Image: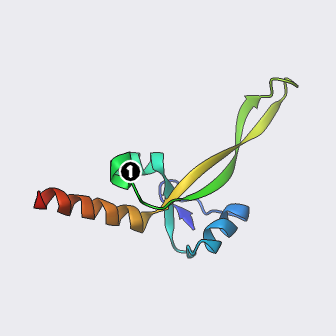
Amino acid sequence: MINFQTKKEYTGGNLDILAEAGYSEDDYVLTFKQAMNVFKVTGDMLKGLKGLGTSLFFYKEEINQETGEKEKVRRYFTVFNVKDVERVIQENKLNKEAA
């Protein structure tokens, strides 16, 4: 599984989660915000589309309020298969044309 925008491969637990959900190695996925930026979609357009939750570690410098030390932070994202996003976009266009 590869992130569509960053072209980075998913590894570790995220790879396991995606594989268990039926994604194949050559599938491209992206987050909601990435879908908004790349495909110019809205939340209404993706309504009902099934996403899959993954977690990523970021080496973002965030200060722990209790210890004052910098730590890496885990963020959770929902990712979507690019094929599903493209299908929803096409369906949306067809619906607008029919209206």
Up-down relation of residue 44 to residue 26 (above or below): above
* Quadrant the C terminus occupies: bottom left
Left or right position of 92 against 68: left
In the rendering, at what x and y percent does residue 29 appear? 50, 62
Q: How many marks?
A: 1
Left or right position of 21 against 43: right
* Quadrant the N terminus occupies: bottom right
Q: Which residue is mark 1?
A: 38
5 or 85: nearer the eye? 85
| Applied colour scheme | rainbow
Left or right position of 88 against 52: left
Tell me the amino acid under the disc marked 1.
Val
Q: Identify the residue shown where x is 67% and y is 61%.
A: 14
81 or 7: nearer the eye? 81
Residue 29 in sight in this render: yes
90 or 28: nearer the eye? 90
**Helix or strand or loop: what does disc 1 sit on?**
helix
Q: Identify the residue shown where x is 33% and y is 52%.
A: 45
